[in-house]
Image: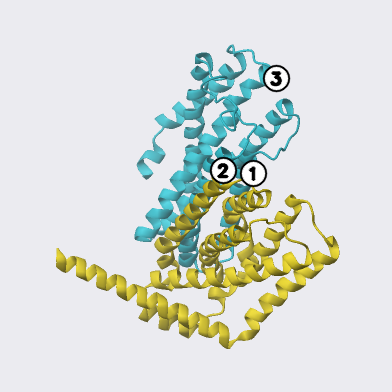
Amino acid sequence: MSNILQKKWWKITGLVLVFYAIVGGMLLPVPARDILNETIRNLYYHVTMWFTMIVLLTISVIYAIKYLSNFNINYDIIAREINKVAMLFALLGLFTGMLWAKFTWGAYWTSDPKLNGVAASLLVYAAYFLLRNSLDDSEKRARFAAVYNIFAYVMMLVFILIMPRLTASLHPGNGGNPAFASYDLDNQMRLVFYPAVIGWILVGLWIASIQIRHQFLIKKIND
Amino acid sequence: MVCIFKQALHLAHMFFNQVITLIKKDFRLELRQKFSIAGMLLYVLATLYICFLAFRQIIDPVTWNALFWVINIFAAINASAKSFIQQPEGEHLYQYLLVPPQAVIVAKIIFNAILLTVISLVTFFFYALFIGNLAGNIPLFIGCLVLGNIGLASVLTMVSALASRANNPAALMAILSFPLLFPLLLILLRLSKTIVDDLGMDTELKYFIMLGGMSVLSLTLGYILFPYLWRD
């Protein structure tokens, strides 16, 4: 674990890909669409945030399960720090999404199932940190947080994956709207979109790994 | 092979007996302290009367539906919050030595489901009396209540187990459970809305299946995860 955290190659790859996504996202040609116009470029910055968030939360749940199987406190630190970074990406995704919504749907906030899903998952993870803070004993805190982490992750997944399919959504791909694949995401955009996703995931992992190493050092000093 | 099967059957039988005993114990405790169930009913009645004073009669199905579930959800959170908070330390240890944690959580969920169903049936009766009944198909609506309360109980019991060991259980209970209940509540609101609007069995059946699926999901999670909360 600590080995791969300290390797440089994946961090450089992440940075290069994100740099490419920012420059390429601004300059490369995009298909001209009604209503969306040039805001379609936000796809590179908005959707990638969600991909990163989901990946980070999934890794965090894996560490929560690992914690419950052998009660190594380091796994708890990893799960917690990854959740923090995931919340950062959730907020970034929310803000970029709100801007996009203002320009295409006319309002910053609509009652869209995906928006409700995001609001719910932000509340769930805010509650996660609150639960952590209200338990004093560190072993018990880790155990309860891991249990809540798993429980909340499944509920959140149900909410953001199943709910939008139940109701009409303004998002592409739901409720009768055409999906990305059939309409906005032509091959030109894929050239930027997929590298952007990988790049942001790597950068997210990098931020998380710095946080984790920092917390490990704090723990070492305290011990 | 037959031997293994017999052993499994024996274990299942034992588990079943333990669950039944625990449920009986919970009911006996509940009936012994009548003030707690009476308190719950009074809470519901007072809330309903405030709603009656505020609304008089509700004709709009959306408002009727939303108000009913808001009252119900608060009553459910209040009622299930005490499932683990009330237990004294000694009893906890005693149970820990006697029965497996899985039996404890299953028994608590079943008990809470029954308790919440009773409370919400009373709520529905007085809601219909004071504010009016918009649900045309009452048996179907009651079915929705029963299934919904099983789902609510399985999430809320688990959250109550989490919150009970923290510093501020009552406040934490509400904070932890609301976001987790969002998916369940959304399905419940949709389902009861379709019953009120009388949209036909096709859509209702779809929502009933989803409701059942959610209950099974949270029950399974509780069954797997509860042992980690139990041991201290």
How far from the left and from the top, in percent, is residue B167? Answer: 60, 71
In the shown orientation, is residue B221 left or right of residue B167?
A: left
| Mark 3 in CB contact with mark 1 (< 8 angstroms) | no
Assign the C terminus of chain B to one quadrant of the image.
bottom left
Give the CA distance from mark 3 to mark 1: 23 Å
Comparing B71 with B102, the one in front is B71
* Other-residue count near label 1 (Cα within 10 Å), few / some / many at <14 / 14–19 / ≥20: some
Q: Residues within 10 Å of mark 2 (few under 14, many from 20)?
A: some
Report in which chain the residue with disc 1 lies.
A
Label 2 or label 3, whichever comes before in sequence order: 3
Q: CA distance from mark 2 to mark 1?
A: 9 Å
Picture quarter containing residue B103? bottom left
Task: Tell me which chain appears yellow.
Answer: B
Q: Callout 2: helix, strand or loop? A: helix
Residue B122 spot, x, y in % from top left: 66, 71
Residue A142 placement (x, y as % from top left): 47, 61
Q: Colour of chain A?
A: cyan
Discs 2/3, front: 2
Q: For the residue carrying disc 3, how many other residues have a C-alpha within 10 Å: few (<14), some (14-19), or many (20+)?
A: few
Q: Position of residue A199 (x, y in %)?
A: 49, 28
Tag 2: amino acid: Met
Image point (61%, 51%), residue name:
B191
Amino acid carrying mark 3 in the image: Ile
**Which residue was labeled with disc 1?**
A116
Name the residue tied to disc 3: A35
Whichever of labels 3 and 1 marks the residue nearer the N terminus, that label is 3
Residue at 52% of width from left, 41% of height from top?
A161
Disc assigned to residue A163: 2
Q: Is label 2 in contact with label 1 (beta carbons under 8 Å)? A: yes
- Can I make out residue A198 in this image? yes
B190 up-or-down from A28: above or below: below
